[in-house]
Image (cartoon, rainbow, N blue to C red):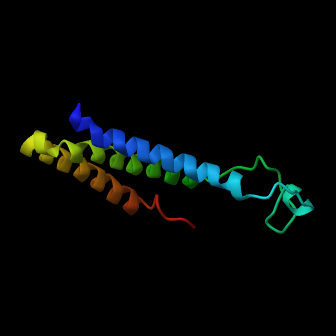
Amino acid sequence: MREYLPILFYLVISLALSLLIVGLPFLFSSPQLDPERLSAYECGFDPFDDARSKFDVRFYLVAILFIIFDLEVTYLFPWAICLNHLGLFGFWSMMLFLLILTIGFFYEWKKGALDWQ
């Protein structure tokens, strides 16, 4: 159970930080509502189109790519903690995983999936 202690510590710290970030605005915000805060749009202009307009497909593609490459970091935490016990096989397995993700990233980059026009 001792090898899971860093993961538990990481989860407790991240939960505490999340609750702190969510809770601080409730402590320091003013409850008074003015007409500007009650308006539907605070960006400075009135809405000019339907809210159900179509999004470009590239928006979803970039979002999915972000999720995929963000999940690789999730796999790196337990791997880094257990690397002493995994040995060379565990090290090279992760290097192969990262190589496949890097090749996929360069493929998407060459295809122009990350270009925003």
Residue found at x 19% / y 41%: 82
In which quadrant will I find the C terminus? bottom right
Residue 116 higher or lower than 80, as above or below: below
Q: Quadrant of residue 5?
A: top left
In which quadrant will I find the N terminus? top left
Q: Nearer the viewer, residue 45 or 102?
A: 45
Residue 52 image position (x, y, % from top left): 77, 46
Q: Nearer the viewer, residue 63 or 27?
A: 27
Q: Is residue 44 left or right of residue 20?
A: right
Residue 78 image position (x, y, % from top left): 27, 42
Q: Nearer the viewer, residue 16 or 104?
A: 16
Q: Is residue 59 left or right of residue 33?
A: left
Residue 87 image position (x, y, % from top left): 8, 43
Q: How many marks?
A: 0
Residue 48 higher or lower than 17, as above or below: below
Q: Nearer the viewer, residue 34 or 109?
A: 34
Residue found at x 90% / y 60%: 34
Residue found at x 85% / y 67%: 45
